[in-house]
Amino acid sequence: MGKIIAFANQKGGVGKTTTAINLAAALSERGKKVLLCDFDPQGNATSGFGVDPRSLEISIYDLIVADQPDVKAGIISTKWVDLIGANVNLAGAELDLIGMDDRERRLRNVLEQVRGDYDYIFIDCPPSLGLLTLNCLCAADSFLVPLQCEYYALEGLSQLMTTVRMVKKSMNPGLTLEGVLLTMFDGRTNLSIQVVEEVKKHFPGEVFASVVPRNVRLSEAPSHGKPITEYDRMCRGAEAYLALADEILKKNKEKGRG
């Protein structure tokens, strides 16, 4: 059975989608079968793999609002990973879900149908703590938190952890923290180094050794519809995500997965 990991941080611009795309591609390169589910109405994880969100015949929105969805019909095979895409239709899902049965578990019901086909299923969460993110946390075995190395890195993270505690208590008791990933690190600044120390104090033993640097090539890759390992595999950003993939595999092997 594949492991489902949600990439969550209600703060935007922290490298969440970048991490979901590039870690998925890196794990695929390591021989793992990966499905990336884009659950952000912006559809950036979809376009990041070269798929136009506007061209989707079946998006994740269609699958979560259908009572008996044909999940495999919504899966697109890209050169790197399989993908369930998202587009602007998902923006209206919070209202649509309110009146539905099992509204917090709609995504879980979709992904459970194909869990056995993959080693890893990644969910790119929206930058909010509404019903969509609740669906992500209810569907996941674990969640990974990308944190930007900046002054306000930990601000608002307490809200995410409060939401996680609520989900664990009443909806998904098995949910665990996969780890905290530090992104946009600049070793030339004292601030980045101080943020690393502060985050390690707040999450002892939970911070990945791999750190994603500030890297122009990383920010360019999505506009070309490619993961960084294809766009420029010799850059520091590619090295960081390949190292993170190895770290994830090692961690899950120790737990009997991966």
Image: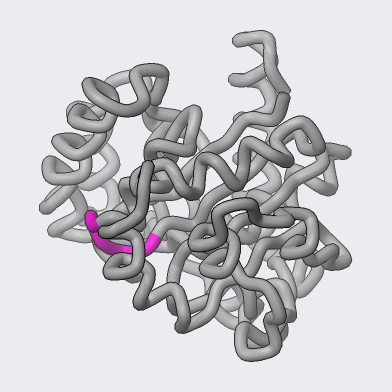
Pick the front one: 158 or 134: 134
Pick the front one: 191 or 36: 36
Q: Which image quadrant: the C terminus?
A: top right
Is residue 234 among the parts visible in the rendering? no
Measuring from the top left, give residue 159's x and y in whole percent.
13, 45
Measuring from the top left, give residue 246's x and y in whole percent.
69, 33
Residue depicted at 34% across the width and 52% down the height = 133
Is residue 223 among the parts visible in the rendering? yes
Measuring from the top left, give residue 106's x and y in whole percent.
46, 48
Residue depicted at 63% across the width and 69% down the height = 85
Is residue 129 within the magenta segment?
yes
Q: How many marks?
A: 0
The scheme the figure's colours follow is one colour
Residue depicted at 28% across the width and 21% down the height = 204
Is residue 1 within the magenta segment?
no
**Which stretch appears magenta?**
126-130
Image position of 107 with respect to 97: above or below: above
